[in-house]
Amino acid sequence: MSMEDDVKYILYKFDAVVDKQASSHPEVKQDISIYRKLRLWPGEEYNLIGNSTYMEYHLVGTEMEAKRAGCIALMLQKLGNQHHCLALKEAFAFEGFLDILEEPERDWLSSFPDNTLIGPAYHVDGVVVRSTFAVWQPVCKTENAEKEVSLAR
């Protein structure tokens, strides 16, 4: 195989892994200890999928980053529940939110069901990451059933 063929094969395998993960969002586990400590998580019925991050980090400290951070903060403050989370459907309807998302980020978020939540993102030391947000998806019913069975034992 040529180098070009090797690269194409690796990218093909990577796409297959990403597609598999995207089709099974609820199985992804993240460390939520800081969210529990701060009491800013939607509860046991949600899994933290990850944080949605603006990929153009050479723009850190720029007007675009400030616009993004401001929009996220305003949206979470106005529409968020007691944990500062809101449904993805509400976020998509919030004026300016779609404008601050990059196309891959928008596509990724669109792959989730409407009852997916977004909320503030925190660094492991408890500091809020203003230009990003956490994505929470409801635990699938089979996971809930497994938890109930293990608790019953």
Image: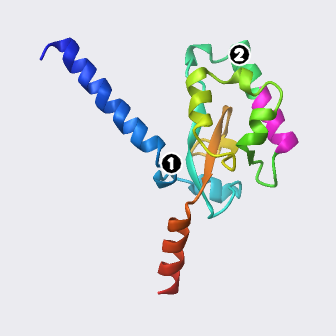
Q: Residues within 10 Å of mark 1 (few under 14, many from 20)?
A: some
Q: What residue would you read off at disc 1?
A: 25
- Bounds of the magenta segment: 70-79
Magenta stretch contains residue 74: yes
Q: Position of residue 132 (x, y in %)?
A: 65, 33
> In the rendered image, which quarter is residue 98 located in?
top right
Please state if 153 lies on the left or on the right of 60 as rendered. Answer: left
Please state if 96 lies on the left or on the right of 130 as rendered. Answer: right
Q: Which mark is residue 133?
A: none
Amino acid type, mark 1: His
> In the rendered image, which quarter is residue 93 located in?
top right
- In front: mark 2 or mark 1? 1
Amino acid type, mark 2: Met
For this orientation, the residue located farthest to the bottom is 153
Q: Position of residue 26 (x, y in %)?
A: 52, 53
Q: Residues within 10 Å of mark 2 (few under 14, many from 20)?
A: some
Q: Position of residue 85 (x, y in %)?
A: 74, 48
Quadrant holding the N terminus: top left
- Majority secondary structure of the magenta segment? helix
Q: How many marks?
A: 2
Q: What residue would you read off at disc 2?
A: 64
